[in-house]
Amino acid sequence: MPTNVTPEYKKAEEAYRNAREPKERLDCLRQMFRTIPKHKGTEHLQADIKTRIKQLSEELAGPKKGGRRSGPALVVRPDGAAQLSLIGPPNAGKSSLHARLTGSHSDIGPYPYTTHFPVPGMLPFDDVQFQLVDLPPVSSEFMEPWLINALQPADGALLVIDVSDPDCLEQVPAVLECLRQKKAFLTPAWPGLDREVSAGLDDTDDPFRLDLPTVLIANKSDLDPDPEEVKILEELLGLSFPALTMSAKSGDGLDELGPFLFRALEVVRVYTKTPGKRADEDKPFTVRRGGTILDVAHLVHKDIARDLKFARVWGTDVFDGQQVGPDHLVSDGDRVELHA
Ligand SMILES: Nc1nc2c(ncn2[C@@H]2O[C@H](COP(=O)(O)OP(=O)(O)OP(=O)(O)O)[C@@H](O)[C@H]2O)c(=O)[nH]1
Ligand SMILES: [Mg+2]
């Protein structure tokens, strides 16, 4: 963080870090630009903010008629309990996994660089869904210039590799380096897993630094059935991501992803009910551990959040129908009646 920034700027930066919708992010960036002290020490940051405002405005303007920017959206609006991006070298099987896990029809090809645009899809787990976004590959030869933007709304990443391909020893460091150069860092630290965050993170104050909790997906296990293979790989590469072994072809290991994400992201499901009625048991709202009644109210409707007075809760750490305030922390499975 540059010195001498104002509280207004800090507030705008904090809001930017928390914003998930592209439109909201753009508003925050504009606020950052308005409030940043204009002196020599902030020149780099000013330039960075301006570039991001330009990129995001273009993205939001959508396809231009006959212009360069036509085709599918390059940033996927978050949906479900969390958004996860599929990242990896060419031909690792990202699209094959995406198709199997979400039922999407993402293009699959026996040659590299098959996928050209983000493809969203939903992975069901229990009564929630995770949004998986298939992406074009990353390699030292080429990375789509918009790819880093597409990662911004993500809550985590699936780093997909072909575990049977010896080239992944070069490919994985190349992927990590390409992302790092654009300030995106894949980290083994997930909120719900007991793992130490690697020390010595530099520049954690940079508002444009993106840290994505990452799980290594060792795909094509049908071609290399040695269950130790991924451990050996991680050791050779000096990595410590949590890892899951899968085969998009045989289907092995696919059903481990949902439970992993639920636990690692500390998803908390809350069922809302209207007074005197049963809770809507099929469609929970989801927050993360640490989420409050007010966070749930925001998901239901912004007016309800604005006017919220108290809630009644049935579930964990409360007696049945206990009255609680907006700051009360919710637990998984809570049934909640919101009173405005
Ligand atoms: N044997 C085997 N083949 C697989 C598996 N997963 C994918 N493949 C094959 O690997 C090739 C590449 O698959 P894609 O899903 O297109 O790979 P991708 O990572 O999306 O490739 P890009 O979009 O180019 O980055 C295809 O021929 C798939 O049929 C698997 O688990 N086992
Ligand atoms: Mg693909």
Image: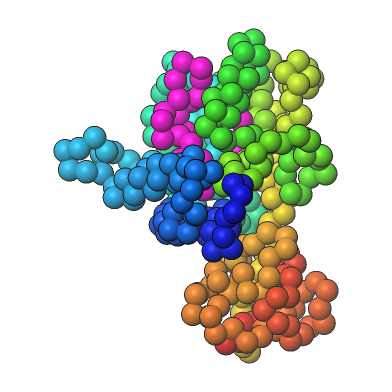
The main secondary structure of the magenta stretch is loop
Q: Is residue 55 magenta?
A: no
What colour-coding does the image apply?
rainbow
Quarter of the image where one finds residue 330: bottom right
Q: Is residue 147 magenta?
A: yes
- For the point 72% across and 54% down, the residue is 266
In this view, 16 is above or below 241: below
Q: Which residues are magenta?
A: 135-159
In this view, 163 is above or below 32: above
Q: Residue furthest bottom?
A: 276
In this view, 136 is above or below 297: above
Query: How many labels were placed on the picture?
Result: 0
- For the point 49% across and 75% down, the residue is 302
* Relative side of 323 to 7, left or right: right
Q: Residue furthest front?
A: 40
Residue 331 placed where, x, y %?
75, 67
The residue nearer to you, when weighing 104 against 330, is 330
Give the quarter of the figure containing the C terminus. Answer: bottom right
The residue nearer to you, when weighing 334 against 182, is 182
Res. 281 in view: no
Residue 305 placed where, x, y %?
55, 78
Q: Residue furthest left?
A: 66
In this view, 226 is above or below 300: above
Res. 294 in view: yes
Residue 320 placed where, x, y %?
79, 83
- For the point 74% across and 86% down, the residue is 323
Residue 219 placed where, x, y %?
63, 25
- For the point 27% across and 38% down, the residue is 69
